[in-house]
Image (spheres, rainbow, N blue to C red):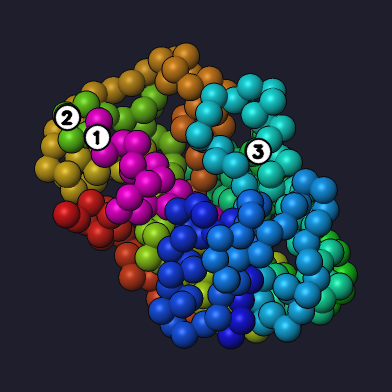
Amino acid sequence: MRIVVAGSSGMIGQALVASLRTGGHDVTRLVRRRPSRADEFEWDPQHGVVDAEVLRGADAVVNLCGAGIGDKRWSGAYKQAIRDSRLTATDVLARAVADAAVPVLVNGSAIGYYGDTGDRVVDESAPSGSGFLAAVCRDWEAATAPARAAGVRTVSLRTATVLAPTGGMLGKLRPLYSLGLGGRLGSGRQYMSWISLADEIAAIEFVIARDDLHGPVNLCAPEPVTNKRFNSALGGALHRPAPWVVPGFAVSALIGEFAQEAVLSGQRAIPTALDGAGFTFRHSTIDEALAYACAR
């Protein structure tokens, strides 16, 4: 297949491009700088500029663009950057995909769509929740409307926390746990949905290939865990004690609004769409995923 990928410089994007090429696919990368390789083409989503000829003849477009939600403290300006980096890029690509008659658009989203679900189990049929991240995800998915209206098979990847050997959340936590400074956050009862990077990439490739999958698809393992359980599992995977408890007010003071939206609350989401389509997880339990992500 010929696949065009936007947002290929991030952790997921890099791994996806490498895997697709290993599988024999022709990958074209859309970049926001002057191209330095033959497989790169410049685009400017901020000004709505993308060369339709780059998309013409593609079998699928994958859009993973978006500023990291935990990369900076949430100021008003950075929250706007989180929104704009997702919505603007998606709107531009959705229109370009429709114009170029690309048959498939696989677009990023997140399980933040559901808001804080508490103990309630949710799948793709659940309504959107409340809060900043839920609103961003709703608008992010809505921005694919031009592609859907043109009959393009459109999938919104509601991705959970990705557990990877390098980078991501574990990249920040591993040094602390290695020093014996790990511990649960707040009550520890908040749920966390997660997926290993290996399963994330396999699931995206699965979605690209399956003509019967469209709309929202939860990219999360079948067994979400509480923060307390995750803390215990990560300490075990790193062979380090994780005895500490960081009170909720301290977490909020340290990282601000992001704490309430994504650290002290969470989602208990399950992958009904993937399960129904026959996807097989390589890492279906948190212990398997952390053994993979923390292996030397």
Magenta segment includes 77:
no
Q: Secondary structure at mark 1?
A: helix
Q: Foreground: 128 or 36?
A: 36
Residues rendered magenta in the picture:
157-176
What is the C-alpha distance between the residues marked 2 and 3? Answer: 32 Å
- Tell me the CA gap for discs 3 and 1: 27 Å
| Left or right side of 103 for 171 | left
Most foreground residue, 199 or 2: 2
> Residue 8: where, in percent of width, then height?
54, 59
Residue 175 image position (x, y, % from top left): 24, 34
State which tag comes first along the sequence, 2 or 3.
3
Tag 2 residue: 179
Residue 60: quarter of image: bottom right
Q: Is residue 196 above or below residue 277?
A: above
The residue labelled by disc 1 is: 175
**Residue with the mark numbered 3:** 82
Q: Are marks 3 and 1 in contact (CB under 8 Å)?
A: no
Residue count near mark 2 (Cα–Cα under 10 Å), binned few <14, some 14–19, many ≥20: few
Q: Amino acid at mark 1?
A: Pro
